[in-house]
Image (spheres, grey):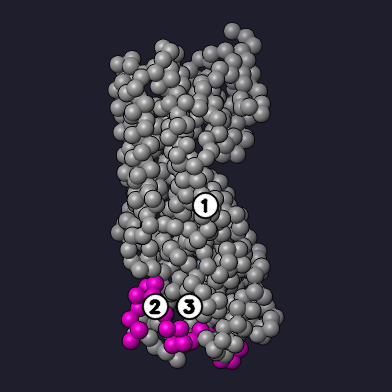
């Protein structure tokens, strides 16, 4: 049974999707006014863990992530640079998608952009006006929070604090300003606007998510995520708009992650302490998979303190996994299998799943994995690992890597696709073989083959080609086939 901490209600709850076997998930995406920083990726990585775990447990997941390409911040940025909104936001959108690939974050089913859903937003404002939840002032439309009796249920706002009839125009504000918030903003000098049924203007930030989630997931869906800074006002306002409009419950489970901090403060552009994924890789030589592991490895409800030391530790942990697999895959082992390893593997899988079932407790899950590797390394040094044992160990890592997605398997390992529900997962360990893809290569050459596979996976084709040419100069021909890479030694 999977359990999550639901911000709505403030307690751990057993997860039950509305439709058996399918999870509808909405996560607030980037506001494309700058390059996303690793604080943002803390949130997207936690959502990736959540999604991959649900998939691993056999659910279908329909994931929608919006792109906020019109709001106060994007408009200001475009105006400051004297370029159109689209020209300004596009480079950040592209960089965001590149980062997702670099960090191996699974793509959502839909990435709707706010600017492509403006008429639908005007329609929702119109509906709220007709139902008496919204009012107009000089072409601006506001949500009347006094009309929505459940206002504050997510962020636990004291109803007595509500400053009803007082309006706030900016998209972002603190709890001290619990006021009627802007749904739609009338055109201002130098701002982009759209002609709609409710008049010209542009949407407020909050209405964007209410509209885009309903469009793809329906009025009621299972999980909505974001960072804790989204709880108020963004998500509180989404609930008010959506529930007032549809007269149905908006979301069953609200799951929020804590911040990534640096030098004791939340990483954010306004604090000037941001660092981007590309900066880490290009200027600090960071391994993207070490960053992925670092972002994954602190429980989502705890703050994650970013330091270079922590990044180095993540790199060592990653190497422990990769070295272990390479060790097993490169040695000729005696035929046979042992009960001890079967038990070790089963225990690891059991504890890995048990940890994540418990509100995504990644620490328990990772401890299970590293404990198995530690114990198996000892057995290996005592020559107690047999061929089938090695295959089971590697297959179990491949299985949990469906969730972690951090491991680079050597190209001579072949897996049968591990699909199916969780009951079947505990029986998958034998479905692996160490395939011979050609004559045995010297260790350094094999390392180069692995490096090239990694470069190809990261779409670094320049490096991949260079490695292939280097190997060719040594008399090793690589051939990329549909079953993977093969090689031939043409001269000794
Ligand atoms: P934004 O582009 O500012 O709207 O943020 C996009 C997502 O990143 C939201 O879910 C935020 O809650 C999240 N976020 C922003 N800064 C941090 C941080 N320092 N740590 C964790 N999540 C963050
Ligand atoms: Zn949102």
The x and y percentages for residue 130 are 59, 87
Packing grade of label 1 (10 A; few <14, some 14-19, many >=20) is some
Residue at the image point whose x is 62% and y is 83% from the top: 126
Q: Which residue is mark 2?
A: 152
Q: Nearer the viewer, mark 1 or mark 2?
A: 1
The residue labelled by disc 3 is 240
Give me the residue at 33% from left, 86% from top.
Answer: 160
Relative to 195, residue 399 above or below:
above
Helix, strand, or loop for circle 1? loop
Residue 2 in sight: yes
Viewer can see residue 166: no
Query: Who's the residue at 39% across and 72% down the image?
Result: 154
The residue singled out by tag 1 in the image is 21
| Nearer the observer, 193 or 203 | 203
Q: Which residues are magenta?
A: 137-160
Tag count in the figure? 3
Q: Mark 3 or mark 2: which comes first in sequence?
A: 2
* Quadrant into which the C terminus falls: top right
Mark 2 CB near ligand 2 (8 Å cut):
no
């Amino acid at each position: 049974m999977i359990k999550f901490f639901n911000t709505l209600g403030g307690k751990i709850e057993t997860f039950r999707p509305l439709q058996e076997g399918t999870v509808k998930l909405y996560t607030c995406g980037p506001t494309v006014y700058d390059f996303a920083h690793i604080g943002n990726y803390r949130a997207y990585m936690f959502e990736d863990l959540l999604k991959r775990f649900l998939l691993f447990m056999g659910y279908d997941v329909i994931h929608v992530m919006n792109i906020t390409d019109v709001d106060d911040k994007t408009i200001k940025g475009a105006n400051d640079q004297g370029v159109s909104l689209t020209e300004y936001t596009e480079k950040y959108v592209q960089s965001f998608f590149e980062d997702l690939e670099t960090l191996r974050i699974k793509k959502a089913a839909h990435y709707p952009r706010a600017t492509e859903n403006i008429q639908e937003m005007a329609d929702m404002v119109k509906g709220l006006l007709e139902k008496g939840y919204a009012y107009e002032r000089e072409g601006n439309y506001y949500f009347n929070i006094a009309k929505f009796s459940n206002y504050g249920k997510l962020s636990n706002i004291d109803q007595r604090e509500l400053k009803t009839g007082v309006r706030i125009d900016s998209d972002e504000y603190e709890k001290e300003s619990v006021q009627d918030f802007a749904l739609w903003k009338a055109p201002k000098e130098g701002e982009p606007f759209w002609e709609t049924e409710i008049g010209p203007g542009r949407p407020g930030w909050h209405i964007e998510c209410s509209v885009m989630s309903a469009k793809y997931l329906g009025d009621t869906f299972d999980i909505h995520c974001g960072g804790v800074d989204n709880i108020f006002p963004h998500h509180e306002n989404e609930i008010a708009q959506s529930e007032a409009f549809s007269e149905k419950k908006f979301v069953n489970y609200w799951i929020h992650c804590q911040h990534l901090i640096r030098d004791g403060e939340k990483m954010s552009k306004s604090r000037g302490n941001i660092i981007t994924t590309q900066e880490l890789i290009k200027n600090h030589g960071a391994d993207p998979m070490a960053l992925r592991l670092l972002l994954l490895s602190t429980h989502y409800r705890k703050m994650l303190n970013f330091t270079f030391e922590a990044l180095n530790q993540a790199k060592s942990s990653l190497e422990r996994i990769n070295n272990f697999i390479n060790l097993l895959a490169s040695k000729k082992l005696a035929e046979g299998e042992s009960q001890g390893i079967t038990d070790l593997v089963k225990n690891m899988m059991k504890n890995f799943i048990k940890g994540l079932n418990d509100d995504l407790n990644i620490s328990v899950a990772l401890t299970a994995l590293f404990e198995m590797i530690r114990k198996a390394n000892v057995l290996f040094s005592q020559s107690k690992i047999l061929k089938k044992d090695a295959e089971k160990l590697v297959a179990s890592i491949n299985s949990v890597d469906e969730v972690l997605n951090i491991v680079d398997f050597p190209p001579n390992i072949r897996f049968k696709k591990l699909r199916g529900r969780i009951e079947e997962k505990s029986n998958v360990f034998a479905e692996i073989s160490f395939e011979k893809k050609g004559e045995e290569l010297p260790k350094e050459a094999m390392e180069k083959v692995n490096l090239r596979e990694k470069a190809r996976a990261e779409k670094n084709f320049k490096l991949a080609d260079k490695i292939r040419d280097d190997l060719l100069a040594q008399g090793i021909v690589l051939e990329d086939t549909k079953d993977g890479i093969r090689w031939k030694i043409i001269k000794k």
